[in-house]
């Protein structure tokens, strides 16, 4: 996989796939505002390095899920404005992805100029399952440039025109972000410093079971909280009341626990949980032992004894990977578990990696300094697939 420094970019037109998929909101006067510009910031080093190197930088990205239709509220226009502010230099914007206006804008560029194209997902061919359709769009995009740089880590697990098909049509390299992310995940997958502890939480057990399966040969300890822990508690034979439960996964979970034991991997589950009468911030709630959840109650966070236990299990770790919040942190009464574990990870001092969109959001929402973690991934789905051991098409294509 080539990196930016392997390319001669001066005077060249460089097409960059970035991940600028930021959350949008509205201000008091109803204007669209960017509520979290983390992903734009993460894209700056590559764009700035290319422009500094004299490239004509053509950036493409997606925003939201317009499903192949032009949705004005998902235009990248406000992103172009923020990108320019953060870069401290002008960024041109064309409200199209391909066609005459785009060709005109590109032919008018000088060395060091930056141009952002409109939302790639306004074009149905971007996400088409038909390679021929994607290829048609990829031909049009590749025709705009001399080189391709892949820097949208959040989309490298997708087989999409701007991610994989364009890469096949132009000399290519990984941008700084994709390079850094791939390095981190390769390191924790292949050669983690020990003890190596993985903390898993969040909502979907079935998604994360594949991760556990792939990690068993390398990990020393698995700490499990969040919505997924109730299927584990159920597999141990406990009643979980109205907690999130994937009943059809109980057998698989039991099997995973047996395999973990054989492999000498310690599985740490909560010993107490915060249960509530309903899924709401002001529901009646109490803390109970993990084996004593009564019918009519649902576990929405790990309890204080679990936080302490998890912190102990993290304190000696040399490598920690964390994916998935410990509770429904979006509601204040159920955020303590996630905050406590995040704090314990930040305090652990080894190499600490956070993957998962909601986990990264939790760190920001809870005001835990991002600089206290070694790496916070920008790609939730991509980081999970990396940990599952899957080949990511957007990475594989760069290795060709
Ligand atoms: P990530 O994006 O970090 O990979 P997930 O998407 O898997 O995490 O899960 C995040 C979601 O899981 C959050 O919205 C959170 O509210 C929810 N969650 C965590 N604990 C529970 C629980 N005990 N019951 C229901 N949902 C939960
Ligand atoms: Mg998520």
Image: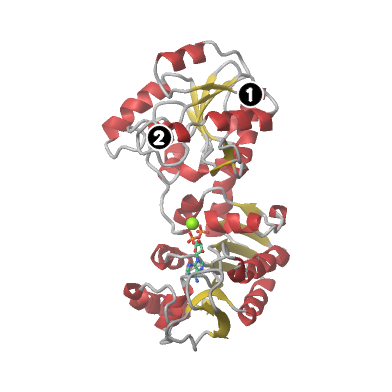
Q: Which residue is mark 1?
A: 51
Residue that label 2 marks: 121
Task: Say how the picture is coloured.
Answer: secondary structure
In the picture, measured across the screen, residue 25 lies left or right of residue 157, that is right
User: How packed is label 2: few (under 14 Cα within 10 Å), some, or many (20 or more)?
Assistant: many
Give the mark nearer the N terminus: 2 vs 1.
Answer: 1
Task: Name the residue at 61% across, 15% down.
Answer: 111
Q: Residue at x 66, y 70 (%)?
A: 340
Q: Nearer the viewer, residue 131 or 83?
A: 83
Q: Residue furthest front?
A: 29
Give the SS element for disc 1.
Answer: helix
Q: CA distance from mark 2 to mark 1?
A: 25 Å
Which-is-in-front pick, marks 2 and 1?
2
Q: Position of residue 273 (x, y in %)?
A: 55, 80
Query: Looking at the rendered structure, which numbered label has been put on residue 291?
Result: none
Q: Residue at x 40, y 74 (%)?
A: 245
Q: Badge 1: few (under 14), some or many (20 or more) residues near its Cα, within 10 Å?
A: many
| Quarter of the rendering containing residue 400 | top left
Q: Is residue 161 visible?
A: yes
Task: From the top left corner, tell me how far across and down residue 338 is, in percent.
Answer: 61, 67
Residue 41: give x, y in percent of width and height: 64, 39
Asked whether the residues under the numbered discs 2 and 1 touch, taking CB atoms below 8 Å apart as contact, a structural biologist would say no
């Amino acid at each position: 996989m080539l990196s930016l420094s392997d390319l001669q970019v001066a005077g060249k037109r460089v097409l960059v796939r970035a991940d600028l998929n930021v959350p949008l909101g509205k201000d008091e006067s109803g204007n669209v505002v960017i509520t979290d510009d983390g992903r734009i910031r993460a894209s700056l080093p590559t764009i700035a390095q290319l422009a500094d190197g004299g490239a004509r930088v053509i950036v493409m990205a997606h925003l939201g899920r317009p499903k192949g239709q032009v949705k004005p509220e998902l235009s990248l226009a406000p992103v172009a404005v923020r990108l320019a502010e953060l870069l401290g230099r002008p960024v041109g914007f064309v409200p199209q992805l391909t066609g005459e206006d785009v060709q005109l804008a590109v032919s008018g560029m000088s060395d060091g100029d930056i141009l952002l194209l409109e939302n790639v997902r306004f074009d149905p061919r971007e996400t088409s399952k038909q390679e021929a359709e994607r290829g048609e769009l990829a031909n049009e995009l590749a025709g705009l440039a001399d080189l391709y740089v892949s820097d949208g880590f959040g989309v490298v697990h997708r087989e999409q025109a701007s991610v994989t098909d364009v890469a096949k049509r132009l000399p290519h390299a990984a941008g700084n972000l994709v390079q850094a992310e791939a390095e981190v995940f390769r390191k924790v997958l292949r050669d983690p410093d020990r003890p190596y502890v993985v903390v898993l939480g969040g909502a979907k057990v079935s998604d994360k079971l594949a991760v556990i399966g792939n990690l068993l040969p390398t990990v020393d300890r698995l700490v499990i909280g969040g919505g997924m822990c109730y299927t584990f508690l159920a597999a141990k034979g406990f009643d979980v009341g109205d907690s999130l439960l994937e009943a059809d996964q109980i057998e698989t979970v039991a099997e995973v626990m047996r395999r973990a034991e054989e492999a000498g991997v310690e599985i740490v589950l909560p010993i107490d949980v915060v249960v509530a009468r309903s899924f709401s911030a002001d529901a009646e709630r109490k803390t109970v032992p993990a084996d004593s959840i009564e019918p009519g109650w649902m576990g929405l966070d790990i309890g204080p004894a679990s936080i302490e236990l998890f912190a102990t299990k993290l304190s000696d770790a040399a490598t920690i990977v964390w994916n998935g919040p410990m509770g429904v942190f979006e509601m204040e009464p159920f955020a303590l578990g996630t905050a406590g574990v995040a704090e314990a990870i930040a305090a652990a001092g080894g190499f600490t990696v956070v993957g998962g969109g909601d986990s990264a959001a939790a760190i920001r929402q809870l005001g835990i300094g991002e600089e206290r973690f070694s790496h916070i991934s920008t790609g939730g789905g991509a980081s999970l697939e990396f940990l599952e051991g899957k080949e990511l098409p957007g990475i594989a294509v760069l290795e060709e």
